[in-house]
Amino acid sequence: MKRFKQFVSEVDASREELNDDCWDGYTAVGMKMKNGRKVPNCVLKDDIKEDWSDAKYKNPEGGLTRAGVMAYRRQNPGSKLQTAVTTKPSKLKPGSKAANRRKSFCARMSGMKRKLTSAKTANDPDSRINKSLRKWNC
């Protein structure tokens, strides 16, 4: 049992050392798998300050732009955020991944619109929630 505890403490110590393995100007943001072992996810320090919710990443027609989605994914490693499904529902094959994503999004956001917004926001055509629902063809 002593050998096992010693081994575990050595592994924990080596993990802490991995966090210091980033180059100058980079910082470790979590860990990632590389060649079957965990290594630090080194990200440029400038990218961490980047805020995906800035106006430059918002699409004027609703939702995030592709650059906004990429900024979000850089800030949140492991995220699977994707851009909107803008294809018309009549053009989507029923049961396809895109159709299911669209259906799920519309169900979730329509409920949010009813319960979590004021009457003024719900009726405003320029509110972010209404713009996104239009973009997704809900």
Image (cartoon, grey):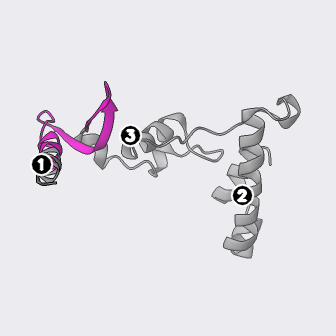
Marks 1/2: CA–CA distance = 52 Å
The residue depicted at 45 percent of the width and 36 percent of the height is 70
The residue depicted at 11 percent of the width and 46 percent of the height is 10
Image quarter for residue 137?
Answer: top right
Q: Amino acid at mark 2?
A: Arg
- Report crowding for label 2: few under 14, some 14 to 19, many 20 or more residues within 10 A (C-alpha): few
Q: Which residues are magenta?
A: 12-39
| Quarter of the image with the N terminus in it | bottom left
Q: Residue furthest right?
A: 90
Marks 3/1: CA–CA distance = 40 Å
Q: Marks 3 and 2: in contact by CB < 8 Å?
A: no
In the image, which disc is placed on residue 95?
A: none
- Report crowding for label 3: few under 14, some 14 to 19, many 20 or more residues within 10 A (C-alpha): some
Image quarter for residue 26?
Answer: top left
Q: Amino acid at mark 3?
A: Arg
Closest to the camera, between mark 3 and mark 1, is 1
Along the line of sight, the residue nearer the viewer: 32 or 122:
32
Q: How many marks?
A: 3
Give the image location of residue 88, x and y in percent. Answer: 82, 34
The residue depicted at 77 percent of the width and 66 percent of the height is 123
Q: Marks 1 and 3: in contact by CB < 8 Å?
A: no
Residue identified by numbered label 1: 3
Say whether residue 82 is left or right of residue 22.
Answer: right
Q: Could you say whether the residue bearing mark 3 is in a helix, strand or loop?
A: helix
Q: Could you say whether the residue bearing mark 1 is in a helix, strand or loop?
A: helix
Q: Amino acid at mark 1?
A: Arg
Tell me if residue 10 comes above or below residue 109 in the rendering.
Answer: above
Residue identified by numbered label 2: 108
Residue identified by numbered label 3: 74
Q: Could you say whether the residue bearing mark 2 is in a helix, strand or loop?
A: helix
Give the image location of residue 11, x and y in percent. Answer: 16, 44
- Report crowding for label 1: few under 14, some 14 to 19, many 20 or more residues within 10 A (C-alpha): few
